[in-house]
Image: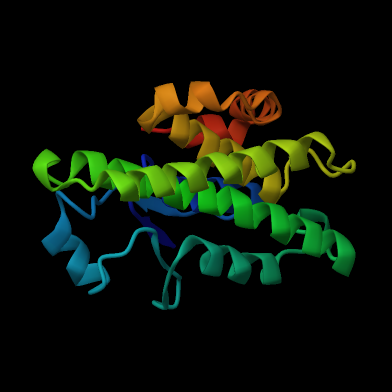
Amino acid sequence: MKLYGMLDSPYVRRVAISLAIYGYSFELIPLSVFADFKQFATINPAVKAPTLALDDGTRLMESTLILDYFEALAHTQHKLMPQEAASLAQDLHLLGFILVACEKTVQIVYEQRLRPEEKQYQPWQNRITTQLHAACQVWNEALATRNHRPSISQVTLSSAVVWQFMQFVLPETTQRLNCPTIQALSDEMAATPAFQQYPLA
């Protein structure tokens, strides 16, 4: 298999680390949707990272859809999502807030770094920043009260990937959020082999 995208994308990194934990081998092809746009378009005309080419040539995109596929293939002992309905609903609820935080972080970065300063719209930045803060508050509180689960799951994995991305691109904002439970979990995950194999770069 070939995974196309850069590890500075939390979505690409989320897939890479998950595949490593599932036990799949793959080749990481570090193409940028910006610097390598034309080359990426030959792989996926939508130029969407991550794009994963399966062994049979089928190409998947969107991190959650890619992970849904491999979760369906995983044996029970290797699954990263609960099988019992109530626990699954709780994890999906929490993953929703984690991914919203990721999405709002990306929107802030794009607004501040890609749009010319004279065309930036402050009310829009205020709105998405408010959404980011709200998502992180729920996320941190939910982790703090979370029932005992396996140390590595899609919730813990995605929490660490997204938080580390936020610290990398919005360090001052992340520091002000004051989310000690997320921070502790992120530190724990950073020490695992899969995270060290695919570092934020």
The colour scheme used to paint the residues is rainbow
Decide which of 101, 10 is in the foreground and name it.
Answer: 101
66 lies above or below 175: below
Decide which of 168, 176 is in the foreground and name it.
Answer: 176
126 lies above or below 188: below
Q: What residue appears at the point 44 percent right and 62 percent down from the top-left corner? A: 1
Q: Position of residue 160 (x, y in %)?
A: 59, 36
Across the whole image, how many numbered discs are drawn on residues?
0
Q: What residue appears at the point 89 percent right and 41 percent down from the top-left corner? A: 148
Decide which of 99, 161 is in the foreground and name it.
Answer: 99
Q: Position of residue 100 (x, y in %)?
A: 53, 53
Asked if residue 41 lies left or right of residue 195, the reply is: left
Q: Position of residue 116 (x, y in %)?
A: 11, 43
Quarter of the image for the C terminus: give it: top left
Decide which of 97, 126 is in the foreground and name it.
Answer: 126
Q: Can residue 199 be seen at all in this image of the molecule?
A: no
Asked if residue 85 lies left or right of residue 188, the reply is: right
191 lies above or below 114: above
Q: Can residue 198 be seen at all in this image of the molecule?
A: yes
Q: Position of residue 86 (x, y in %)?
A: 88, 64
Q: What residue appears at the point 50 percent right and 32 percent down from the top-left corner? A: 164
Q: What residue appears at the point 25 percent right and 66 percent down from the top-left corner? A: 47
